[in-house]
Amino acid sequence: MAAHFGRRLRKGATNTAVAAAVAAALVASQAPGAETDDAGRQTTTGTRPSSDTPAADSATGNSPYYTDLPPLDSPSPAPTVGPTADPTVTGDATAGIPATVLDAYKKAAAALREAKPGCNLPWELLAAIGKVESGQAGGGNVDASGDTITPILGPALNGNGFAHISDTDNGAYDGDSTYDRAVGPMQFIPSTWAWAGRDGNGDGVENPNNIYDAALAAGHYLCRFGWDLSVADDLHSAILSYNNSTDYLNTVLSWLEYYRKGTHEIPDGSGALPGNRSDTPAGSSPSPQKPSQKPPQNPETGSPSPEPTPPSGGGSTSPKPKPPITPPTVTDTVDHLEDGGTAQLTAMAGDAFAERVSTRAENKAGKGVAKVRIRFTIVSPTDATFTGGEKVATVVTGTAGVAIAPALQAGEKTGSFTVRATVVGRSIPGVDYTATVTPRAADALARTSDTELTCTAGGEFAEQVEVKATYQGAVADRVAVTATLIKSVLDPAENDKGPYFKDANGDAVRTLTGLETDANGLLKLPKLYADDTVGTYILRLTTAGGATLDVPLNVTEAESTPSPSPSGSTSSSPSPSENASSSPSPSGSGSSSPSPGA
């Protein structure tokens, strides 16, 4: 599984035995089992790992691991490194972690704090798993970008002392087109890496042989299913899902506790290397298989070369032992996958899909195959997930050979995406399903007030328009709304006169887009203004889903006011009698004719 190491970290047998006993006691008090519910999630019931959990459903395929345990003594604190201090003097050698590897663990944990803050992933857990899986990438045998200098490969999972997992990647990751092998510093099998892989160093490639990519992938793998790793049951379930072995759980927990008490950075390539593996009896030599090297390759085809045949004639050769015959599993009897009767997959943004993906595993005769694990993976760029926020789910087929995926949950990204169903542990073609996310919609709009909206020419409306959107009677939140001042009910073109909104520059606009209802389905429009044209106008609101509302707006004449009089005096027209009495006499101005009797 991990690299073959030329030197070993040796420990006293007594210390190792005591450390193992302490770890076992810790786990026995609260270690959960690993069972699977109908949604493909591992639950935490029982006190031991489930013995029937398929190896292909773990991160490593339950590959061998290093069993070396940390010393009983806590790590010595690293001395302060001053300007003139020797940077190679950093304290206890066992507690040291190669610089690039340590950086990868810490960056992965930091990324998980943002992506899945409820997981509470400690970087020391990644360090513990990295120690047990590959001895910290072979003592830090990586380059500056985090790529392993020599490949780290586990043994072929051919059923001979290991799980039986036939090739799933055509040798792309592990160089073996017959069986799968665990790959890289965190020892992912190809079928798991296919959905769990991550790009941790930002080079655009998801590479299981890169410690940054592998550490980030391991972090996301351990944080799936909503597990909170600060809770003992969830922590144990996550570790068991990585490699389904109680001894493995004990070993990882021992290193986790050790690293939590103190560790430090050491130069790459100088890490302490383990020497005992779970597939090698204590005290014996390591397996002759050198998993740090790829299988011999045919230079023309790139495929593993066949074993050399002994020369004919001449001396005798020892008969080559025949490989053990592995009985076929139920998974081996699957010939193909068929759609299990999946209806149209459509949901509105933010909603759960009413229909679920259904897949049927069949043998060559077309009969359903039960107890086969089907992996459902969302393979297209989308923010849709399965229930629980995951992009992948594994479900066991029932008696009719049918597996039904967990419900899909639409995100906010609209459009179509693909869900792919494949058989775990087989490289037969999968079945693709298209799912579509439509925009959030409303089928009804209504004003929240019945106050008549009136304004005088050149003024502003006192009340802002507020509406509530609903869909099938329920609140329609985050629905896009367009508001347009139209020419008439029969002519929806934008009006060029009458009421208007103002943009950021104070200019008149008569169409608003990008509006959205709030969590309660409410939307309050900006303030409306009127130009000097009187009349009745229409504000039309529309939404995705067909909801339309016409709001009448009345603009009336401005009230007239009397003209101001000249300052300091008032003028009035004389009455007719006043005019007559003041008229000048015929004899001239200022005189009057004498009376006849004068």
Image: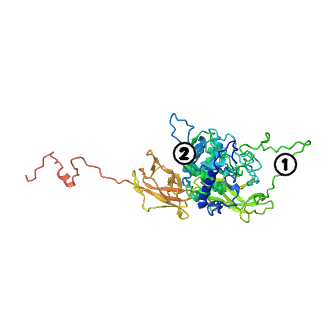
* Quadrant in the rendering for residue 53: bottom right
In screen coordinates, is 572 left or right of 437?
left
Disc 2 crowd, CA 10 A, few/some/many (<14, 14-19, 20+): some
Q: Position of residue 427 (x, y in %)?
A: 75, 52
Q: Secondary structure at mark 2?
A: loop
As drawn, 169 above or below 394:
above
- Residue at image mark 1: 320
The disc labelled 1 sits on which kind of residue?
Lys
Q: Is residue 263 something one can see in this rendering?
A: yes
Q: Residue furthest left?
A: 598
In screen coordinates, is 126 left or right of 164?
left
Q: Position of residue 539 (x, y in %)?
A: 48, 55
Decide which of 543, 343 is in the foreground and name it: 343
As drawn, 39 above or below 583:
below
Q: Position of residue 598 (x, y in %)?
A: 7, 52
The disc labelled 2 sits on which kind of residue?
Ser
Decide which of 300, 121 is in the foreground and name it: 121
Q: Residue furthest top?
A: 84
Q: Secondary structure at mark 1?
A: loop
Decide which of 87, 217 is in the foreground and name it: 87
Residue 238's disc is none
Q: Position of residue 340 (x, y in %)?
A: 72, 62
User: Which of the two discs, 1 and 2, labels the residue nearer the N terminus?
Assistant: 2
Disc 1 crowd, CA 10 A, few/some/many (<14, 14-19, 20+): few
Determine the CA span between mark 1 and mark 2.
52 Å
Residue 76's disc is 2
